[in-house]
Image (cartoon, rainbow, N blue to C red):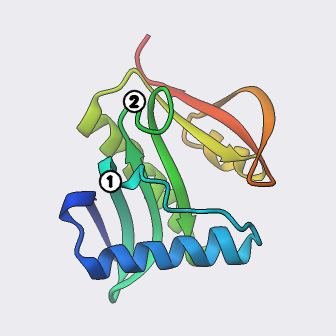
């Protein structure tokens, strides 16, 4: 297995196609949530994915503060197959890359509420009330890196 980290400007058309295909398969089709995944934020993000034999197993994106959320953020966290540990691999790497690239005081994400426990394992803490986004309950979560 291999992890790749690229800024949007470095992606090949095949890489971009495979990323968008996976995001659509999970976020739109599997979760039965018709929304426009391509939100123009991708252009300024770093894209991180775990692959094997040219197949993406897990993916996420990292955005600088103010691009998507108030703080540096990790989003669109996704795995092609569930229960294989690929989500943990991609989150560990995403946190390291966010720190390496942006050196933030805090990393923020909007988690689907059912996944709150998953993000807790990486030190993220919930804040505020749950909210609906695209018909799915979410919660804001923060990883505080500096005091």
Label 2: element kind? loop
Numbered disc total: 2
Q: Nearer the viewer, residue 24 or 126?
A: 24
Q: Nearer the viewer, residue 108 or 9?
A: 9
- The numbered mark at residue 136 is none
- Residue 2 higher or lower than 35, as above or below: below
Q: Relative to 43, is 88 on the left or the right? A: right
Q: Relative to 53, is 126 on the left or the right? A: right
- The numbered mark at residue 43 is 1
In the current view of this chain or complex, which residue is farthest to the left? Answer: 10
Picture residue at 51% right of the left edge, 68% below the top:
86
Residue under numbered circle 2: 65
Q: Position of residue 15 (x, y in %)?
A: 31, 76
- Residue 102 higher or lower than 135, as above or below: above
Q: Is disc 2 surrounded by few (<14), some (14 to 19) or many (20+) residues within 10 Å?
A: some
Picture residue at 33% right of the left edge, 86% below the top:
54
Identify the image quadrant of residue 65. Answer: top left
Q: Position of residue 69 (x, y in %)?
A: 50, 33
Q: Position of residue 51 (x, y in %)?
A: 37, 77
Q: Nearer the viewer, residue 28 or 114?
A: 28
Is residue 11 shown to the viewer in this render?
yes
């Amino acid at each position: 297995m291999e992890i790749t980290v690229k800024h949007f400007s470095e992606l090949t058309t095949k890489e971009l196609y495979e990323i968008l295909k996976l995001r659509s398969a999970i976020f739109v089709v599997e979760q039965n949530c018709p929304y426009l995944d391509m939100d123009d934020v991708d252009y300024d993000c770093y894209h991180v994915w775990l692959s094997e034999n040219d197949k993406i197993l897990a993916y996420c994106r990292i955005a600088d503060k103010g691009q998507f959320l108030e703080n540096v953020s990790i989003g669109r966290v996704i795995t092609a197959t569930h229960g294989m540990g690929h989500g943990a691999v991609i989150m560990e790497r995403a946190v390291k890359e966010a720190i390496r690239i942006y050196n933030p005081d805090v990393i923020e994400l909007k988690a689907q509420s059912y996944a709150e426990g998953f993000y807790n394992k990486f030190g993220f803490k919930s804040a505020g009330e749950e909210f609906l986004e695209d018909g799915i309950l979410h919660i804001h979560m923060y990883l505080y890196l500096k005091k």
